[in-house]
Amino acid sequence: MGRAELAALRGRLAALPTLREGLAAAGFDARGTKRSLGQHFLFDLNLTDKIARSARAPGAPSDAALLGATVVEVGPGPGGLTRSLLAAGAEVVAVEKDERVAAVLASLVDAAEGRLTLHVDDALAVDWTALAPRGAIICANLPYNVATPLIVNWLTAPWPLWWRSATVMVQREVGARLVAAPGEDDYGRLAVLTGVRASATRLFDVPPSAFVPPPKVWSSVVRLDPSTASDAPVAMLEAVTAAAFGQRRKMLRSSLKTLTKDPEALLAEVGIMPTERAERVPVADFVRLAEAHAAMTARAKP
Ligand code: SAM
């Protein structure tokens, strides 16, 4: 997309009704939001612009942070963030579960002139590589109830990952679990999986008052950038961390009994003290544990 086309698109976006008007025109006002779908909407376009800028593609100009990028958005809702993504130059593929949103977004789809594709579907069930065959940037204000399974789904996708970065608004507590380091209270399975596949940065926090209707908790915008190399055995890693953090305060020689009959042999293989506890084990050591367990399991097979 060239500069002139982007300027014309921005003009069409600016001429759209407000987000509240768009919802009301489709017979879907803020009182009709569904808590079961985590519907807490953002009407402040300065904030949605800030989130879109945070997803900036490498090499993109600062005044068009997503120029030339395909962006996958989960849950466009009334379309505030979607407008910001389009105005930043992105081509947007949006997946929304609530079919009422199709009517709300009709005028935005028109204004986007082919740069916004809306799929009414469950983001937990779609095939992302079919929706974005050339890869994509993920940017979304995620529904709280499915944020963690979605992020786990993206992190455990075949390597190399289909997404180039993921900038997501999540509950602040989930954000803390994504970026936690060993020794911190929030360090657990999610932090290890994230650390294996990506680097995670907590960018900024957003108060409940920014949303309509306001949720009970604060939110955080977190950016994940895939690591340059990671052929770690992710399924085995998940089995190891499930056992280790299943009883996080116990010593590994005890907690890993749900994984293997002989935890001490496994720990000796990678040089980790049997008295160590999961909450202090660095990501790289979990990877070595997963690799050693895979190798020992293969050796033990008749
Ligand atoms: N992006 C909008 C914004 O920032 O105002 C809405 C964000 S709201 C937190 C989450 C959106 O995700 C809602 O529109 C909701 O209907 C949608 N949603 C909830 N569960 C979903 C799922 N499983 N798949 C796709 N969309 C979902």
Image (spheres, helix red, strand yellow):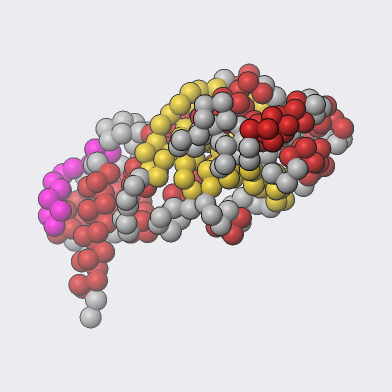
- Location of the N terminus by quadrant is top right
How many marks overall? Answer: 0
**Foreground: 24 or 229?**
229
Instruction: Residue at 78%, 44% (x, y): give it.
Output: 102
Q: Is residue 131 above or below residue 81?
A: below
Instruction: Residue at 34%, 42% (x, y): give it.
Output: 195
Q: Residue furthest bottom?
A: 302
Which image quadrant for residue 90?
top right
Q: Is residue 277 left or right of residue 179?
A: left
> Residue 284: horizontal and vertical position, in percent?
24, 46
**Foreground: 10 or 170?**
10
Which image quadrant for residue 209?
top right
> Residue 291: horizontal and vertical position, in percent?
24, 59
Q: Is residue 101 left or right of residue 75?
A: right
Instruction: Residue at 20%, 72% (x, y): give it.
Output: 299
* Residue 278 in magenta stretch: yes
Range drawn in magenta:
268-280
- Location of the C terminus by quadrant is bottom left
> Residue 91: horizontal and vertical position, in percent?
63, 43
Instruction: Residue at 47%, 45% (x, y): give it.
Output: 164
Q: Is residue 57 left or right of residue 110?
A: left
Q: Is residue 14 above or below residue 120?
A: above
Would residue 26 be seen by someone viewing this image from the given angle?
yes
> Residue 161: horizontal and vertical position, in percent?
44, 53
Would residue 143 be seen by someone viewing this image from the given angle?
no
Q: Is residue 109 above or below residue 129?
A: above
* Residue 95 in magenta stretch: no
